Image: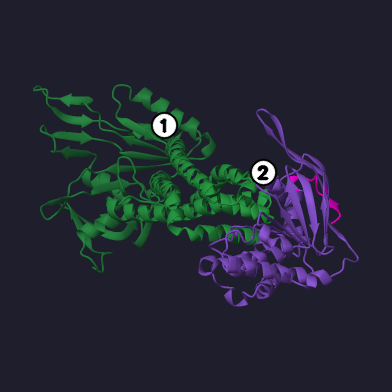
Chain colours: A purple, B green
Amino acid sequence: MPEQKKERKRENLREALHLEDIRKAYHTGSGDVPVLKGINYDIWRGEFIGIMGTSGSGKSTMLNILGLLDKPTGGLYRLDGIDVSRMSDYELTRVRNIKIGFVFQAFNLFPHLTVQENIEVPMLYAEVPAKKRHEISAYMAERVRLGHRLDHRPNQLSGGECQRVAVARSLVNSPTFILADEPTGNLDEKTGAEIMNLFHELHDAGTTIVMVTHNPYYEPHYDRVIYLRNGTVWKIIDNIAGYTQEYQ
Amino acid sequence: MRLRDQLWLSFHNLMLHKVRSILTSLGIIFGVGSVIAMLAISEGAKIQALAQIEAMGTDKIIVATRKPPASGKDVSDSSGQSLMDRYGITRVDLDHIRRMDNVEQVSVARNSRKKILSGMKRLDLSLVGVSIDFLKFSRSDIVQGRWLSNIDGINNTCVIGLNVKRSLFSLGQKDIIGSTIMVEKDIFRVVGILENSHGTNIPGVGSPNDCIFVTIMASDSIFGKKAYDTSSRNPVVEDVDFDTFIVQVRDVSYIDYTSKRIAAYMSKVHSETKDWTMLVPLDLLKQQEATQNIFTIVMSSIAGISLLVGGIGIMNIMLANVYERRKEIGTRRALGAQKGDIIRQFLFETIFLTSLGGGTGVALGIFIAKMVTLYADMPTAFSLWFIVLALVISAVIGVLFGTYPAWKAAQQNPIEVLRSE
């Protein structure tokens, strides 16, 4: 449990995400099934947030909506000051590309591309010129301590290294926040801890991180933990201020 | 995504699965290959046929003697056996045709029907009496010496075709000009050698390369007009005025009218037996072109079917490919690939496949055509347009059959890949 976290003060809070009465219902044969029933929270820039909940709590749907892969049926979602809740697929993809860095549980690297090429993929879609792509990808690889592995392919790397490549890939377009989905789920305890340390390093450097997980073991790592239950925010644990707010 | 990156990505993906890419484009390779080969063969045949027709000249009408199937105007003896067989186009016809409108000039030729022997061996050559302007009409060139002229008159001078030279003189023999050849009991002095490189085949005369030409006056005075034919069981004396008229028209646009006039006149005068034929090279040319067009249409349909099959094969494999790469597609979408980027990625892959297939097919087709020329001795010809056409068509097939799989790929829901496996 990093001690310096407690020392940090919240000042000059700037909004990264703003969720207001977010609702999501799925259409089925027997009518609409509500999955998210009005979610409200803000995430500030530089925060390390954990979103937790058991299966069926609406956690996955929350992840899809946060990642702009799914649209809410109601409510307001503001990302970096932009209302993204009514955007077209094209605009959402654009926002996703430059404002969200994805880290997946299964790494989702491209096996036929080298480490460097994998890191460059989001920049390809952002139309970054080749020279700049190479510079940035080399820098990011260095940042996750894989500078010596640029020409390797994912199958030549360990699981932990793969996830570090994925983290480097999520950073290249300087996103508003990193959205990590169970990033340690496919790793053993020791490697998982290394990845968590990497996230802490990024966090200390000012990156906003939203991690969706069901692993309560990591609870003390986050600045705040948002617990979901039955499609609503059940409680928010604030590790910096040191209090827990329960709803309902 | 930048076009260059996009193209590279698609190309890279193809190169990952080289064997699969080759197998996938096999349909297109063989389709295009056979199309190119068949087009080359038909183009070769067409060029050959057209050259033969054009070699006769499209501003000409050729009227030729045709030996009637049964004996026509006979002068029979009491036993009923033909002795004298008179048929063919006559001096009267010539005078008539000469006076017709739109007729510029008529050049004539008469085959002396003499056997040309080399020792005891009969050669497939003929001695032909021609008018002085025949050279121009036969579209041949003098390669050595000179052509016949008025000075030759009834002298025993001759001009020989290239094949005549080959069969009568040994290879590399010099001083052919000035040397003599013997036909029956008559000796002729060679004054020139003629070559026809167009493949002209004049009805009643044959290829100028196979002829010994003398002036028609010389032919008349030396051999007379009668020829003794011993080739049939009953010996016959054939009496033929001329074998060929080459009629040059003044205005090609009225060639139809002129040929009809000639045909009408000839069928009126030669009403008893059909001992003449008429040939209008321009008509043949038109017919040949029409036949060629039909052939081309049939060929294109067959080509279309084989390419269709190839295209469907590619679509099938691309669809399987899309299914196999759902995870890649989903990840790309999550990382910021637009639907258009995905569509272009897969579409370019298909177009690359079909274009590479098309290119290989063109090479294969050229190879097959060359082999056909080499082993079957059939002429083949290539024109740039059908190679370009093959490439364009294979690219179009790529678009046609690549669009659906590419669209299908873009519809993949990225949410699927975010689900934990």
Q: Position of residue B168 (x, y in %)?
A: 20, 59
| Subunit bearing disc 2 | A
Task: Find numbered disc 1 in the image and state the secondary structure of the residue it sits on.
Answer: helix
Q: Image height check: is B165 above or below B218? A: below
Q: For the image shown, how many numbered marks are present on the structure? A: 2
Mark nearest the camera among 1 and 2 is 2
The residue that label 1 is drawn on is B96
Residue at horizontal 71 percent and vertical 53 percent from the top: A52
Specify whether residue A87 is painted magenta: yes
Give the position of the N terminus of chain B as an image quadrant: bottom right
Q: Position of residue B138 (x, y in %)?
A: 38, 48
Specify whether residue B124 is painted magenta: no
Q: Which residues are magenta?
A: A77-90
Q: Amino acid at mark 2?
A: Gly
> Residue B381 vs residue A124: left or right?
left
Query: Dividing the picture into quarters, in which one does residue B180 lie?
Result: bottom left
Q: Where residue A56 is drawn, which disc sits there?
A: 2
Q: Position of residue B327 (x, y in %)?
A: 57, 52
Query: Dividing the picture into quarters, in which one does residue A173 lie?
Result: bottom right
